[in-house]
Amino acid sequence: MIHKLAISWISGVMVLAAAESPDLLRFSNGDQLHGEFQGFKEGSQAVWRNDDAAAPVDFKTARIRHVVLRGGRPVKPLTSLSHVALVNGDRLPGTITGLDDEAITLDTPYAGSVRIPREQVAMFAPSPLGGRVHYHGPFVEDEWKMANASFPDGMPPDSGAEDAKEKDEPGRWAFSGSAWYWPGRFSGTALLRETAMPDRSILRFDVAWKNRLAMAIGFHADFAKTKPPDPADKDHAIQQARGRRLSPGDSTVFPLLFGNSYVLQIFSTNLMLFRTALDDKGEPVVERVQINGSSIRLGDAGKARVEIRSNRLTGQISLFINDEFVANWSEGGTTPEDQARYAGKGGGFGFVVQNEDALVRISDVMVAEWNGMPDSARSLQTDEQDIVLLANGTDRFSGKVESLKDGKIRLQGKYGQFLIEIDDIAEIRFARGRLAKETDAAPDSLAVRLSPIGQVSGRPLAGSASAIRILNPVCGEMNLNLESAVMLDFNPSNNVIDDWDAEF
């Protein structure tokens, strides 16, 4: 069992980068300003220092969209993924030290000891992933690249022309704060990250969309290149791809974008999985992986959390949407010959939108080692029973979680009482019928995003560049150390439409 988070980033490099990177303030109208966040004054005012100003400047928080701290790099990332999820959407990282019918007590490195009313806690995850985090973001734009099958020699320079489509220029993803946006024009450009995925991997991200969803996700991709074509060979895949726009459902260009990989296509109503490869001649090959039951319901506009669990060593691939199981595929097996049949040969992943005039946002991307757990406790959640899912991925219990004592959870089940070591628990989902109703956030609230996981919301009261005091609607006043914070998100909204504007 891995209890501490072995983050693959080098701590010294992160501290140096954090010290060198300026903060970024982005206003609601799209304007932005580099400088240093200095804290808050009473009256919902953020204090900002800029080299061009003789003295710090105050800005009303109602005018601010978000502040990205230190280029999105924490001074000191959290060392554990253990956290509780609240009814209002907050995720508070920490170690649980007390539990009874009234409250849960959480020990945190950023706010000390926090007491949370039990009815406000929807989930507690002592060991949610079981392994180390390899990537969390996006907070830095240059960690990603773009590719388009119609431009196999590389993306051309962006002219910035409004008539880019007539000039045969590819569409481009736009980076803003902690998200990538597809602006809904000229589909076919993939957003790629070339490394991060280990052999046993969890790839999780949030996606929001308007005008129907049609998107493909490549994973365990090696981005191998096809053989350069003979200019006279009009039948070569690259020659055929030149100048062609990617249409909804078109899978023929996936090998040109991802190389040897698996590619999951997600539409508003169904999904498909493909193997992509390059044969001995360097020609692209696409094969569909069969599955029983591929229907889903995502709607024409909305948002979802997508999680792909893949194991190159066993060939197991599982898909979860909003923490609920959707599909499972079995590719390969345990022998070296079986493992060689696994199509994904690399450690990269990427996204490509396949709809014209469809807006898509990708955010909160996390890649971590998968401990082999096939289920999510939410898949089993009920109105009356608490669900305890063990870290071994197979054992689960239902009943009423009563207390925590000596590192053991006491569960009153249908067939008796159980004591379970908290270190052996992956996740506890509390009965929906005992939870409080979700309430809207205050209009002047903010959400503090932590790395590599966590969000704490509340109304800012005061503070400095290193620590702030907020009024959390659940826990009351909290003093937050900002060492692990990467972004301050002002006026957070659960309405996906509010998060879009023409310039992002």
Image (spheres, rainbow, N blue to C red):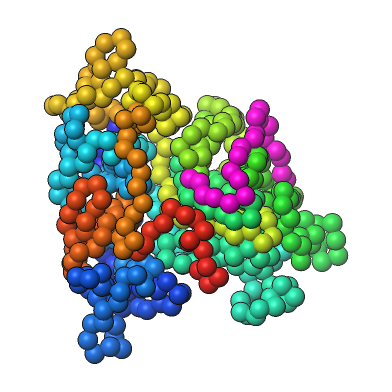
**Along the line of sight, which residue is nearer the eye, 129 or 200?**
129
The image quarter in which residue 247 lies? bottom right
Left/right placement of residue 402 relative to residue 271 reads: left
Q: Is residue 288 magenta?
A: yes
- Range of magenta residues: 285-305
Q: How many marks?
A: 0
The image quarter in which residue 15 lies? bottom left
Residue 501, position in %: x, y?
52, 68
**Along the line of sight, which residue is nearer the eye, 120 or 334?**
120
**Along the line of sight, which residue is nearer the eye, 166 or 441?**
441
**Along the line of sight, which residue is nearer the eye, 335 or 421?**
421
The reply to whether residue 369 is in sight is yes
Left/right placement of residue 98 relative to residue 167 reads: left
For the point 65% across and 41% down, which residue is it?
Answer: 269
The reply to whether residue 262 is in sight is no
Q: Does residue 21 sit above or below 423 in this rendering?
A: below
The image quarter in which residue 12 lies? bottom left
Residue 205, position in %: x, y?
47, 49
Q: Is residue 404 magenta?
A: no
For the point 70% across and 78% down, which residue is it?
Answer: 163
For the point 65% across and 39% down, which residue is it?
Answer: 270
Left/right placement of residue 282 relative to residue 329 reads: right
Left/right placement of residue 19 relative to residue 395 reads: left
Q: Does residue 456 sit above or below 244 in this rendering?
A: above
Q: Does residue 363 sit above or below 71 in this rendering?
A: above
Please state, as top left, top right, bottom left or bottom right, where the N terminus lies in the image.
top left
Residue 488, position in %: x, y?
32, 63
For the point 27% across and 46% down, which residue is it?
Answer: 92
Extreme-top residue of the structure: 415
Residue 155, position in %: x, y?
63, 69
